[in-house]
Image (tube, rainbow, N blue to C red):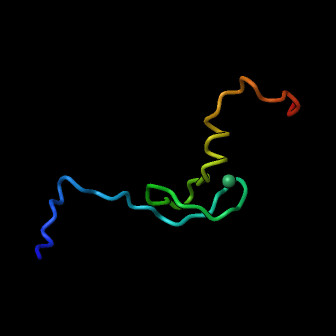
Amino acid sequence: MAYNRDNNDYQPRQMYPATCSECGKKCEVPFKPIEGKPIFCRDCYAKKKGYKNNYNRNEE
Ligand SMILES: [Zn+2]
């Protein structure tokens, strides 16, 4: 049996454990967390990035 995989072709996404700076939840990010930089979990990231189209405008 040959375990000869082509490294060029097949690159599993490396995930790094992190803690969300917004909600404090543990999460994983597809990049290496940088110290001093905020990390957002998927939810918060989506919120940050999100468009405020259909959101309740209760925040202000
Ligand atoms: Zn979060």
Q: Taking 47 as reference, is 7 above or below it? A: below
Left or right: 59 in relation to 33: right
Q: Residue furthest front?
A: 1
Q: Residue at x 64, y 33 (%)?
A: 50
Q: Position of residue 47 (x, y in %)?
A: 67, 39
Q: Taking 33 as reference, is 55 above or below it? A: above
Q: Nearer the viewer, residue 35 or 19?
A: 19
Which image quarter holds the C terminus?
top right
Q: Residue at x 68, y 62 (%)?
A: 25
Q: Nearer the viewer, residue 11 or 58?
A: 11
Q: Residue furthest top?
A: 53
Which image quarter holds the N terminus?
bottom left
Q: Position of residue 5 (x, y in %)?
A: 16, 64
Q: Residue at x 83, y 29 (%)?
A: 56
Instruction: Tally the marks.
Output: 0
Q: Taking 42 as reference, is 54 above or below it? A: above
Q: Residue at x 78, y 29 (%)?
A: 55
Q: Position of residue 10 (x, y in %)?
A: 24, 56
Left or right: 40 in relation to 13: right
| Quarter holding residue 23 | bottom right
